[in-house]
Image: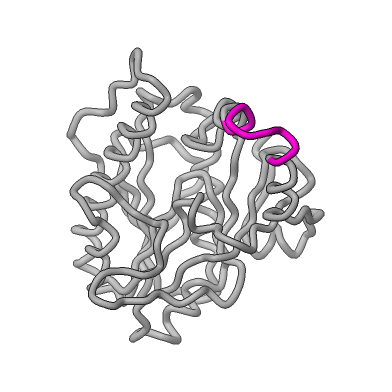
Amino acid sequence: MLVFIIPLKSQQVSKSWSRLSKLFERCLKSVCNQTAPDFKVIVVCHEKPELEVDLPQVTYIQVDFPAPNLDNASFGEVRGIGDTDKAKKILVGLSYAAKFQPSHIMVVDADDCVNKYLVELANNHPQCDGWYLKKGYVHEEGSKLIYLNTKNFNQSCGTSIIIKFSLSHLLFPVEDYYNHHNHLLKDGIVLKELPFIGAIYNIKNGENQFMTVTKTKQLKKRENRLLFLIRKVMKYRPILITNGIRREFGLYSIN
């Protein structure tokens, strides 16, 4: 069994709780659109959003530790605070997941979409240590195009690791920090490359924590603009969003 863990940020730090709820509902529908039925979804949150759907595979765990305080925090501090809150929620989800005795777990960011064949893959390979998503789509909310990252999708998107449940502690090299960047783990564990495109990293949707419009502008300022554009073209391949992509990932516009 594959268990998905979704850490949801608090309403207190959301720019628009209504918009975040819509993004999260799309994420849930995508996760639950699996071709195999043997999976569970654990959502760890401060506040449970009001949704139009009630999916039987989903369990909500509401935490009582303080929500992040982002008042007067710099960009770097916001990121660090967000990392800690996310990691604490993932650890709560992992603890609860043990009751299902899963073969694998996958952390999913609450505004992303995932491939509908993930559970089928995990169920067919219960002894595999896990997979990392080297390739993945990047989607700017509202765009008719989607961008394929074939190089290092797992370096930027948190929805990028499926790992055997008994090895999930290896994703926490230090307390309160979830590391999705590496596929070479301690104890000689090497995660395999997922054999298909596994997720869509949704950005510029008003609630994405890292690759916001502000973050993109900061990156452009740090690099020569021409070099930035060359790197972007080499790393990301634009593709027109097809109905097949929408069905495979449960992607739809929330605008």
Total marks placed: 0
Does 75 sit above or below residue 25? above
Does 151 sit above or below residue 214? below
**Quarter of image, res 33:** bottom right
Q: Residue furthest top?
A: 72
Q: Residue 247: horizontal and vertical position, in percent? A: 68, 62
Q: Residue 9: horizontal and vertical position, in percent? A: 37, 35
- Whether residue 221 appears in magenta in the rendering, the answer is yes
What secondary structure do most residues of the magenta stretch adopt? helix
| Magenta stretch bounds | 219-227
**Quarter of image, res 197:** bottom right
Q: Residue at x 41, y 36 (%)?
A: 49
Q: Residue 26: horizontal and vertical position, in percent? A: 56, 47
Residue 21 visible: no
Decide if residue 228 is on the left or right side of residue 119: right
Does 191 sit above or below residue 21? below
Q: Residue at x 67, y 41 (%)?
A: 140
Decide if residue 104 is on the left or right side of residue 241: left
Could you say which is closer to the camera, residue 184 or residue 119? 184
User: Which quadrant holds the C terminus?
Assistant: top right
Could you say which is closer to the camera, residue 86 or residue 32? 86
Residue 10 visible: yes
User: Which quadrant holds the N terminus?
Assistant: bottom left
Q: Residue at x 42, y 57 (%)?
A: 181
Q: Residue 67: horizontal and vertical position, in percent? A: 26, 28
- Whether residue 109 appears in magenta in the rendering, the answer is no
Colour mapping used in the image: one colour
Q: Residue at x 49, y 58 (%)?
A: 154
